[in-house]
Image: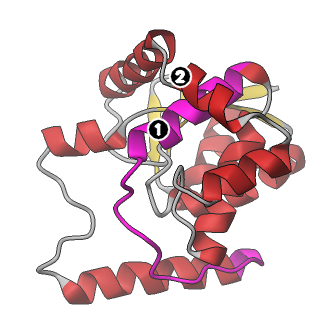
Amino acid sequence: MSNIDFYFSIGSTYTYLSVTRILDVEKKHQVKFNWKPFSVRIIMNEMNNHPFPDDKKNKVDYMWRDIERRAEGYGFSAKTPVPYPLTQFDLANKLAILGLKEGWGIDYVRLTYKRWFQEKKEPATEPNISEICSELKIDKDKIILRASSEEIKKEFLANTDSARNNKVFGSPTFIVNSEIFWGDDRMEDAITWSKKNG
């Protein structure tokens, strides 16, 4: 079975499309995605790249509409614009790292994105975080405490360093060996490449 590294940040808008469909894609194509939460914010700031610039309204409007159209094409919905940028970006992603270690991470990421893009509830903020924890049957206060630990912070930064070293510049990014496939619309390209060159 092919293995594909999946670098993502909760906070990236187009990543909604990937996390919503990735399990079906994984099953259909018999591949394995390795989920790697990282700070796209750090990397984009290093590049002086701002994805939704205030002075480019036409581009911003296009991007929101593009996400809606692409979601519809995949068979689900997106109600944009959504709260952006995130006020709790780091916490949202540290929770993902903790959850991936403890077995609830993928459900947390997918549910967080669903509520963000279908109910406009911002990730890692109240009441959203309490509602998600209730649905996943996990203790909110305990996981926030663990996600705020030095261990999780180091892993978050290590994932970000790994992304940088692999020349990742955006989320979502799929990596097969050293080949980079950036963007939700490159997921299938990554799969095709992995099967030919894995």
**Residue identifier under label 1:** 91
Residue extent of the magenta highlight: 73-101
Residue under the point 51% across and 63% down: 122
Residue 35 visible somewhere in the drawing: no
The answer to whether 27 appears left or right of 13 in the picture is right
> For the residue marked with disc 2, what is the amino acid?
Asn
What amino acid type is highlighted by mark number 1? Leu
- Residue 121: image tag: none
Instruction: Check residue 133 for magenta coloring.
Output: no
The location of residue 21, given as percent across then percent down, is 74, 59
Q: Is residue 98 visible?
A: yes
Instruction: Inspect the magenta stretch and tell me whether residue 85 lies in it.
Output: yes
Residue 177 image point, x, y percent: 53, 22
Horizontal and vertical percent position of residue 60: 29, 80
**Residue 66 to residue 47: above or below:** below
Which mark is on residue 177?
Answer: 2
Farthest front residue? 141
* Residue 159 in the image: above or below residue 65: above
Image quarter where the N terminus lies is top right
Q: How many discs mark residues in the rendered view?
A: 2
* Residue 121 to residue 61: above or below: above
Which residue is nearer to you in this view: 124 or 70?
Answer: 124
Q: Residues within 10 Å of mark 2 (few under 14, many from 20)?
A: some
Q: Secondary structure at mark 1?
A: helix
In the current view of this chain or complex, which residue is farthest to the top? Answer: 151
| Quadrant of image for the C terminus | top right
Residue in view at x 49 percent, y 16 percent = 149
In the image, taking residue 44 as reference, residue 119 lies left or right, namely right
Disc 1 and disc 2: Cα gap in Å?
A: 29 Å
State the residue at coordinates (48%, 23%). 148
Which one is in front, 87 or 9?
87
